[in-house]
Amino acid sequence: MNDIKQLTTPVLYLVVPCYNEEEVLPQSSKEFDRVLTDLIDKSIVSPESKILFVNDGSKDKTWALIQQFSQENSHFSGISLSRNRGHQNALLAGLMTAKKFADITVSLDADLQDDINAVYEMIEKYKNGCDVVFGVRSERKTDTVFKRATAQGFYKIMQKMGVKLVFDHADYRLMSRRALEALSQYREVNLFLRGLVCDLGFTTDVVYYKRNERAAGESKYPLKKMLAFAFQGISSFSISPIRWITGLGFLVSFGSILAVLYALISLILGRVIPGWTSLLISIWFLGGLQLLAIGLIGEYIGKIYLESKQRPRFLIQKAVGLPHDSKAD
Ligand code: UDP
Ligand code: MG
């Protein structure tokens, strides 16, 4: 396998998931096209590059708009999902479609919150040998205090649970075809892309950008969806909540030794009503035993869970001295 050369004029696909974005699409499509045209004019990317909108089962005119854009301008293309599948699935659908045509993809939101100008720097880093370039927010001034606190708390908790994440990186990122091929080997249904991409490895870098306010329309991520997403991230990557049960089991079991001592001393001192000692001891002892047993069963379920994902066990980035393999190019 050759060390894959990063192309000088790669085919770029900008992948944009859209759910009920009729208010913002007319404005954001212009902006995306302006940057793509500039990139093509400056021969930074190939003229075959495109913007790929993913309509995620929108109930408004989003799909009609996407169709109209692609009729008027060959830079635009689109796919439409059969129903609303959620941001992560829509993004994956777009990336896997783009993988067939593109050398690199950049995923970004439809609402112009991700500063599109950061794409230049991302492509430069790709040309310098990166397979994944993460867009990282340089500040969170436009977020409410609540959103900032919850988001940063989330990253901290994830880190504590041993999940590898890039701090303050959402889903604005460049991926090379090689990284996309690797991503396609992750077969799980519960998607948490920003975790998976960190799991891939390869040569990565970050680009800082200022996150803007939504250009138009409302957020499609209300608090309920945000909490579900956070829990998804934790439960897809970590079985540490199960470990906590085991830990608690040990703690309670240890407590039961103390409880036995306490109960026996009380008994000897004759300060108890009949039956109290045996009740107290059984409650502590059984409680500890039950938690330990649940934790133990949980460990096995956790293993089944991780096995059932069938994630790739390794991904090769480089090889030298091997006979030429035509399939690797
Ligand atoms: N989105 C989607 N499907 C959904 C929800 C959201 O494709 O079910 C898209 C949405 O159109 C946008 C991106 O995901 O392009 C991010 O959503 P949003 O900007 O509403 O999230 P926020 O920035 O408020 O966290
Ligand atoms: Mg947004």
Image (cartoon, rainbow, N blue to C red):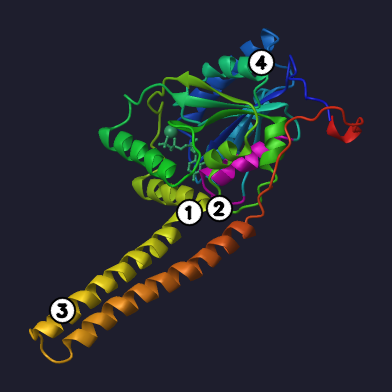
Residue at 38% x, 49% y: name it. 227
Q: Which residue is mark 2?
A: 190
Residue 265 image label: 3
Judge left or right: residue 265 versus residue 122: left
Mark-to-mark CA distance, 2 and 3: 53 Å
Circles 2 and 4: CB distance less than 8 Å? no
Label 4 or label 3, whichever lies nearer to me, is: 3
Chain-order first, disc 3 or disc 1: 1
Mark-to-mark CA distance, 3 and 1: 44 Å
Mark-to-mark CA distance, 2 and 1: 9 Å
Residue 223 image label: none
Chain-order first, disc 4 or disc 3: 4
Mark-to-mark CA distance, 2 and 4: 33 Å
Q: Is residue 38 above or below residue 23?
A: above
Q: x, y (%) of residue 144?
A: 28, 32
Which quadrant would the N terminus be assigned to in this image?
top right
Chain-order first, disc 2 or disc 3: 2
Q: Which residue is mark 4?
A: 128
Q: Amino acid at mark 2?
A: Asn
Residue 235 image label: 1
